[in-house]
Image (cartoon, helix red, strand yellow):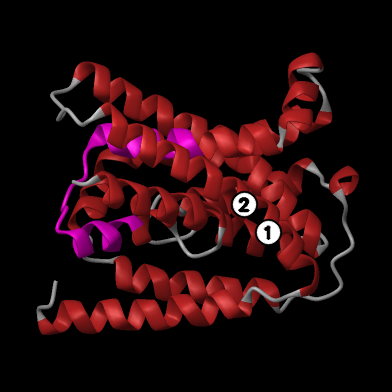
Amino acid sequence: MSWFEAFILGIIQGLTEFLPISSTGHLYLGRHLFGLDDAGLYLDTMLHMGTLLAVFVFYKRELWHIIRHPFSKLTGLLVIGTIPAVAIGLLFKDYFDSISKSGLTIGWEFLATGLLLWFGDSVKNGYKKMDHISYGDAFFIGSFQAAAIFPAVSRSGLTMAAALMRKLDRETAAYFSFLLSTPAICGAVLLQLKDVVTGEVEQLSIFFLFVATLSSALFGYVAVKWMINYLKHHSLKTFAIYVWILGAVVLVCQFTGVF
């Protein structure tokens, strides 16, 4: 792997973690394009560290509030919203890891993501702001986040669609979706760090890892800020059409033996 490939994979991770089009699915395709069937656990961990840094910087005020007020409603919303993903992840991690490595289902998962984006965006008259989000809303949105354990199902896309279904206004839907990603990404990083420490994993250049992490962090921050502003006045249906086209291309390529 070259530094340029590490840089491009960082861009893919940073943008697609927060755009509703699936980071894992796009990383799988990016690795295949570069001939890197498995770019390495170290790299995966550092890519996630980059996007985690991006949300830490963007939500520094909210996270500082949580540290100072650990029993606040905001803390409760994040805990309740994270429970479904934790439960599914702990129970079915090995099964979904095998699916992710094979890549056999990612075309169908892109198509499913598009359907949910289209349906969620069709819900009108959202009015709830952050102060109006209930624990029931958080659990409902978190249940959709749990479905993102499938490799090409977009976590951000499903949580934004679910938030719109619960009548959050469009800006708040994106804002809460990305805030809810913080414990999810933290969990992913911790699980990967455990495997890095206890497993036999390949060694990569520190420079390459730095390039990938910095790229992921910078483009992740841009994606969070841009997406929140975008959803104020624009539709998720554009992204639905994109993942439908991508899913169809992937299925054709798999059927014809291209990969």
- Are the residues tagged 2 and 1 within 8 Å (C-beta)? yes
Of 232 and 181, the residue lying toward us: 232
Side of 41 relative to 214 (left or right):
left
Side of 55 relative to 34 (left or right):
right
In the image, residue 38 lies at what x, y percent?
Answer: 18, 47
Name the quadrant containing residue 252: bottom left
In the image, residue 111 lies at what x, y percent?
Answer: 42, 76
Residue 178 drawn in magenta: no
Q: Is residue 76 above or below residue 134?
A: above
Numbered marks: total: 2
- In this view of the protein, can residue 86 be seen by the observer? no
Q: Quadrant of the C terminus?
A: bottom left
Of 176 and 49, the residue lying toward us: 49
In the image, residue 149 lies at what x, y percent?
Answer: 41, 49
Name the quadrant containing residue 72: top right
Q: Is residue 235 above or below residue 213?
A: below
For label 2, the SS is helix
In the image, residue 23 lies at what x, y percent?
Answer: 42, 55
Residue pictured at 72% horizontal, 30% vertical: 60
User: Any mark on residue 222, and which?
Assistant: 2
Residue pictured at 12% horizontal, 77% vertical: 258
Label 2 – label 1 distance at C-alpha: 6 Å
Q: Main secondary structure of the magenta part?
A: helix
User: Any mark on residue 226, and which?
Assistant: 1
Q: Amino acid at mark 2?
A: Val
For label 1, the SS is helix
Q: Amino acid at mark 1?
A: Trp
> Magenta region: which residues?
27-50
| Local crowd size for mark 1, using a 10 Å CA cut-off: few (<14), some (14–19), many (≥20) | few
User: Any mark on residue 99, and which?
Assistant: none
